[in-house]
Image (spheres, rainbow, N blue to C red):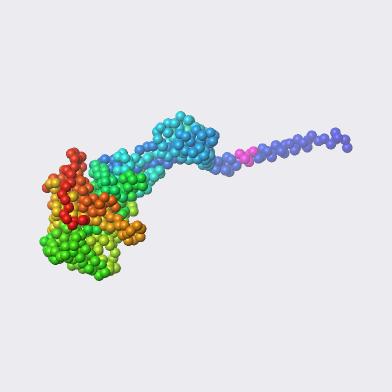
Amino acid sequence: MTVASAYQPGRRIIVLLLVLVVAIGALVFQLLRLQVLDNERYLAWGEDQRMRTESLLGKRGDIVDRNGEELAISLQAPVIVADPLLVTDPAAQAEALAPVLGAEVADIEAALSSPGRFVYLARPTTEAVAEEVRKLGQDGVFIREEPERFHPNDESLARGVLGQVGVDNTGLSGLEAQYEDVLAGTAGQRVTERGINGKSIPEGVREMLPAVDGAAIELTIDRALQFEVERALRSSVEANGAQGGTVIISDPSTGEVLAMASVATTDTGRVATTSDNRAITWTYEPASVMKAITFSAVLNEGEATPTSKRVIPSKIDLWEETFTDETDYGTKWMSTSEILRRSSNTGTITWAGELEEPTFYQYLKDFGFGQSTGLGFPGESPGILDPVETWPGTHYATIALGQSIGVTPMQMLAAYNVIANDGVYLNPRLVKSIGGEPTYPTQERHVIEPEIADDMAEMLAGVVSGGTASRAQVPGYNIAAKTGTARKIQESGGYVDSAGYFHYIATVAGFFPAEDPQLSMIVVIDEPATDIYASQVAAPLFGELAAWSLRHYRVSPAGDVVFGSDDDLSAVGPSAATVPDGAGD
């Protein structure tokens, strides 16, 4: 057979036709798959390439003081974001961006090279930084705005009360966390169509679900008073070389907290407001300020009157313990008023012994000890009050003196408010209204009779006019208060530190004017170095702030009050009266 005879052009044509048919069939099948069989998947993929879904954050609700002054608000702040899919040169862009953002080049490059379509590069940032980024004009890098929490009065004002908000605009602590559901509002959503360069296509909004702003919260706090309290407290802690301090001022007739401040000495020696609201979270032994509660129970049970007298020894042996007074006077006739004025330990124990332990325990519970105040504040301590059935023989005596019991400053002030409020306990309040709707006390109970409360107010006024709290006086006003100097419990559980030293906490609690209480206050100084006694380190601050508050609210000695006035805020100044001999509290 010749070569020519082997050549068959017809077969070659047939093969080519078959190949062509197969190729066309494959193309048809591919088109069928793309447009019919898998069209939904590819349509979704294409839509995902050009459609962007953005979460819209509602404006976080404002927090304002009792007069409508802003304490915490939300403002729009720029954030720098990127779409890694649109970034053309991660390394070069990172080199340019890092110094502008104040970040490491490697971190920015990693973000720009990350999988996905969205990444934060700086959140939040400043307008100046945003403008520098804008000038770079980088592919895939964008500037958007998100709400950021802002404190118009500086972040230090009421820091521990307000709390903090995280980068996601979520409350992390304090009232910001407690009322997160109210303040946060509801997020919305926006779906937009974008071109290949990542920019929005005009009229390309496909869906919009508006965000709902959070509700505003009006506090009972008075901004002007809060500022003055923090200023004076910092000054006092510095002057006394103390570790820290707490002050609360309230309206005893409503339970409204007008000022609540805690400061601490930092490792660098600077005194600053704390993020921990120790007025509510800190538990300590209050010492002799508890004696007013003890005598309230004694008088209300009919065991004594303000003028009842007994022979009081300067030393009492009770079970395995010995209790003494500041000075050894042997024995002395003293009335209950004089016992309180001199802060006699043995006199207090003598009268506390007239109470049945279950009765005394119930009074302590009714005054608010051993339980939450009802504020619901994050981290609030319920204090420490052992069940009465577990009390050892000396427990009633030590509790009567303010030992063997743990209280928060807020609990102690709420107890003094009972005396100032005609014998009625009210839950403390930090929030006046939510979204414009007023809030009201959640708990109210009768603890002592009104006439007993009046007797106690007069007895406490005697403590200031001629007793251990004499440095808390304000000329022209009757101030009712009691001092307390407590040994501070150490980490070991005892009162002595590893070096064998005692540490002390000084407290003054009271209200004013004594005859018609409009304001109440507690001052706690933690570990003062200049002097251990409350009469020396806490009482002067009490008097200074009482004078300022009385002037601020225009309270006359008759007790008239106009809340919210900022006129004529100069302090009258505490009296320089001396402390009687032997009055160490």
Is residue 30 part of the magenta span, yes or no? yes
Q: In the rendered view, would you say 554 is above or below 468?
A: above
Q: Which of 445 and 497 lies nearest the eye of the viewer?
A: 497
Dominant secondary structure, magenta: helix
Q: Which of 80 and 247 lies nearest the eye of the viewer?
A: 247
Residue at 28%, 62% in the rendered image: 404
Q: Which of 545 and 334 lies nearest the eye of the viewer?
A: 334
Is residue 463 part of the magenta span, yes or no? no
Residue at 30%, 47% in the rendered image: 263
Please provide percent x and percent y for residue 213: 34, 42
Residue at 75%, 38% in the rendered image: 15
User: Could you tell me if residue 255 is visible in this image?
Assistant: no
Please provide percent x and percent y for residue 462: 14, 55
Please provide percent x and percent y for residue 455: 13, 58
User: Could you tell me if residue 258 is visible in this image?
Assistant: yes
Residue at 23%, 53% in the rendered image: 534
The magenta stretch is 27-32
- In this view, the residue farthest toward the top is 135
**Left or right of 239, for residue 6:** right
